[in-house]
Image (cartoon, rainbow, N blue to C red):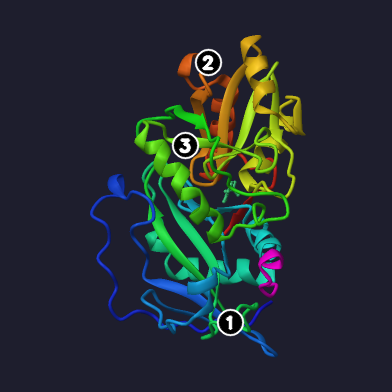
């Protein structure tokens, strides 16, 4: 058991969103947030829950200059019975420590983080939306706070959790997206920070995303940074291919983010009797397999969308279309089962759910 976390309740509760049908994503924040600080020699101290609001920091705070930071993303769901459900939350805080190790940020206690998150959720539980497919997005993050312009790992950090009620990701149903193979920019390289959930990876990927939008695509397929040949991720999601009926995803190699949805898809597929494989997959090999009619489905996996089917993939002069541009059977099945368990509509056979 951990000591009680001191709570300062807001004396100005916010006006709630008018309707749960137009929440969007990441625009509205709840009444409270969790904070703890780290000081060299003292460790993580001063855990507290306070009203959501601006934080004071020095303009010289190291995170603003050198980007020493990590973040996480997970969701809380309302079950039909009105219970609050979390999906594998401990894995997110275990991943915090992997990201921290890479970014030279001190380790956290994952069990304490889950406890702190639950305490925060108990206070803002009424903010969790309950309209179909809506959820409360949870954003834990850590930033370097020292007021210092020299380059070194910081001595002071701040860990925070903020909460954002979010709308259905697919208000119109699961629409496959069109993507292209990014051949100019790379997201990450082996030895770099690709496996860590760190803001700089996103900063580096914005240009490709912006170019994709300009040309009518929704996302890019990232190739490895060395050979510019092996498939890594799609946008900010992991990627799966159904080839000869088997689910194939790129093997974790240091430049790929180890997604919790990726792991869930692999575990679920195996439990349902599908063959799965984590391996290197070259874009030219995929193109050959496609020409032979062996690639039936492609989808991205991540917390926000869960499953994001790919309709078309442009590679050089070739446009590959999967399953006639419609969501495939396996993609749909993965989506239905994972979201079914997340929202408490299906039995949690796999021990994924942590109830508040
Ligand atoms: C967060 C993230 C993912 C997906 O991870 P989940 O744990 O499934 O949400 C995939 N790729 C990148 C680059 C990410 O940042």
* Crowd rating for badge 1 (residues with CA inside 10 Å; few <14, some 14–19, many 20+): few
Residue bearing the label numbered 2: 323
Residue bearing the label numbered 1: 150
State the SS at label 1: loop
- Highlighted range, magenta: 100-108
Mark 3 and mark 2: span between their CA atoms? 19 Å
* Crowd rating for badge 3 (residues with CA inside 10 Å; few <14, some 14–19, many 20+): many
- Asked if residue 118 is positioned above or below residue 351 in the image, the reply reads below
State the SS at label 3: strand
Of marks 1 and 2, the one in the foreground: 1
Quarter occupied by residue 109? bottom right
Question: Image check: 69 left or right of 191?
Answer: left
Quarter of the image that includes the C terminus: bottom right
State the SS at label 2: helix
Mark 1 and mark 2: span between their CA atoms? 53 Å
> 30 or 305: nearer the eye?
305
- Asked if residue 308 is positioned above or below residue 56 in the image, the reply reads above
Q: Is residue 84 visible?
A: no
**Badge count:** 3
> In percent of the image, x 40 and y 59: which residue is there?
164
Residue 81 in the image: state x and y as whole percent.
Answer: 47, 48
Residue bearing the label numbered 3: 219
> 138 or 280: nearer the eye?
280
Of marks 3 and 2, the one in the foreground: 3
């Amino acid at each position: 058991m951990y000591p009680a976390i001191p709570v300062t309740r807001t004396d100005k509760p916010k006006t709630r969103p008018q309707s749960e049908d137009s929440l969007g994503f990441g625009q509205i924040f709840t009444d409270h947030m969790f904070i703890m600080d780290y000081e060299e020699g003292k460790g993580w101290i001063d855990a507290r829950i306070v009203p959501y609001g601006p934080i004071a920091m020095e303009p010289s705070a190291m995170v603003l200059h050198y980007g020493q930071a990590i973040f996480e993303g997970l969701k809380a769901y309302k079950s039909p019975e009105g219970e609050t459900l979390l999906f594998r939350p401990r894995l997110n805080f275990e991943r915090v420590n992997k990201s921290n190790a890479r970014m030279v940020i001190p380790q956290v206690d994952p069990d304490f983080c889950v406890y702190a998150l639950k305490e925060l959720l108990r206070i803002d539980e009424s903010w969790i939306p309950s309209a179909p497919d809506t959820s409360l997005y949870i954003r834990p993050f850590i930033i370097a706070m020292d007021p210092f312009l020299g380059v070194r790992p910081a001595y002071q950090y701040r860990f925070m959790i903020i909460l954002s009620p979010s709308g259905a990701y697919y208000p119109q149903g699961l629409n496959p997206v069109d993507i292209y193979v990014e051949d100019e920019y790379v997201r990450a390289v082996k030895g770099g920070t690709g496996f860590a959930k760190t803001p700089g990876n996103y900063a580096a990927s914005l240009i490709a995303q912006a170019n994709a939008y300009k040309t009518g695509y929704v996302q890019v397929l990232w190739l490895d940074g060395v050979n510019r040949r092996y498939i890594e991720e799609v946008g900010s999601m992991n990627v799966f291919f159904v080839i000869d009926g088997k689910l194939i995803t790129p093997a974790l190699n240091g430049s790929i983010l180890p997604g919790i949805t990726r792991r869930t898809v692999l575990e679920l597929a195996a439990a349902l009797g599908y063959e799965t494989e984590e391996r290197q997959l070259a874009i030219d090999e995929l193109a050959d397999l496609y020409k032979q009619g062996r690639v039936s489905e492609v989808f991205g996996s991540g917390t926000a969308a869960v499953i994001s089917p790919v309709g078309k993939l442009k590679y050089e002069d070739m446009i590959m279309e999967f399953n006639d541009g419609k969501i495939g059977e396996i993609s749909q099945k993965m989506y239905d089962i994972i979201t079914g368990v997340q929202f408490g509509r299906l039995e949690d056979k796999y021990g994924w759910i942590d109830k508040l």
